[in-house]
Amino acid sequence: MSESPIHLRAIQSDDAEAYRHLRLEGLKLYPKAFSSDYADQVTRPMDFWTQRVSSACNSPNQIIYLAETPEGLVGTAGLVRGESPKERHNALLVGIYVKAAYQGQGLAEKLITACLEWGKVHGIQIVKLGVGAYNTAAIRLYQRLGFVQYGNEPKALWVDGEYLDEWQMAKEIMS
Ligand SMILES: CC(C)(COP(=O)(O)OP(=O)(O)OC[C@H]1O[C@@H](n2cnc3c(N)ncnc32)[C@H](O)[C@@H]1OP(=O)(O)O)[C@@H](O)C(=O)NCCC(=O)NCCS
């Protein structure tokens, strides 16, 4: 476990290169944990990442939080709200990743809590997420934070010759 000091902050436009690196690492090391695919994302031009990061900067529709040490980015979590006026009270928690050396220190919990606080400030009522049914560490984390399972999507992903079911979980953040 690393002892480096860790700072949490919202993403900025000049984080595109470092965010790309962190995101691709997560997709490569944990292919079962994400619907995005490493082989597809690694071929995307830098413009794709620049655009993605700039959309999350100073937006009322999405946020990406980063955990940073003096050595670089070590964790991330994002929240994206529904686009339609009928869906804007919903948001999806996405891209939750903490580097292995920094896991087990409560970092994901802090990143997600920051996303939920941002959601409250921006008037979001309910936050939803999808998590692999196999991913007991992540499910425990979400349950600890008050997320409750409301569904199960059979065969949501097909990864390395295996079908994976996905739990759908939700948490009301405004009463
Ligand atoms: C799932 C994941 C995001 C969790 O990140 P994390 O920062 O390790 O999460 P936390 O530290 O908040 O919690 C994990 C464990 O550490 C424990 N922990 C929390 N704070 C701690 C501390 N200060 N000291 C020791 N252990 C601690 C928690 O109790 C928890 O243990 P448990 O699962 O037995 O209950 C991370 O393992 C990961 O990136 N995995 C690969 C990608 C992935 O699965 N993403 C989720 C996709 S839905």
Image: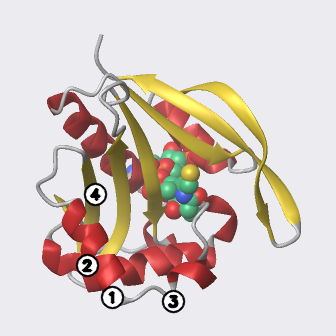
Badge 2 is on which residue? 50
Residue 55, percent across and down?
A: 23, 62
Indicate if the residue with disc 4 has its beta carbon within 8 Å of ligand 1.
no
Camera-nearest label, 4 or 2: 2
- Mark 3 or mark 4: which comes first in sequence? 3
User: Crowding near pointer 3: few (<14 within 10 Å), some, many (20+)?
Assistant: few
Res. 64 mark: 4
Say what secondary structure mark 1 lies in: helix
Q: Residue at x 30, y 69 (%)?
A: 52
In which image quadrant can residue 54 be found? bottom left
Badge 1 is on which residue? 46
Residue 67, percent across and down?
A: 28, 65
User: Crowding near pointer 2: few (<14 within 10 Å), some, many (20+)?
Assistant: some
Mark 1–mark 3 distance (CA, rounded to whole Å)? 9 Å
The residue nearer to you, when weighing 101 against 26, is 26
User: Crowding near pointer 4: few (<14 within 10 Å), some, many (20+)?
Assistant: many
Name the kind of residue labelled 3 in the image: Thr
Query: Could you tell me if the residues under marks 1 and 2 are in contact, i.e. CB atoms within 8 Å?
Result: yes
Mark 4–mark 1 distance (CA, rounded to whole Å)? 18 Å
Res. 65 mark: none
**The N terminus: image quadrant:** bottom left
Mark 1–mark 2 distance (CA, rounded to whole Å)? 6 Å
Q: Residue at x 87, y 63 (%)?
A: 162
User: How many numbered discs sit on the rendered protein?
Assistant: 4
Residue 98, percent across and down?
A: 45, 65
- Mark 2 or mark 3: which comes first in sequence? 3
Say what secondary structure mark 3 lies in: loop
In the shown orientation, is residue 102 left or right of residue 38?
A: left
Task: Kindly tell me whether residue 127 is visible in this rendering.
Answer: yes
In which image quadrant can residue 114 be found? top left
Badge 3 is on which residue? 43
Name the kind of residue labelled 2 in the image: Thr
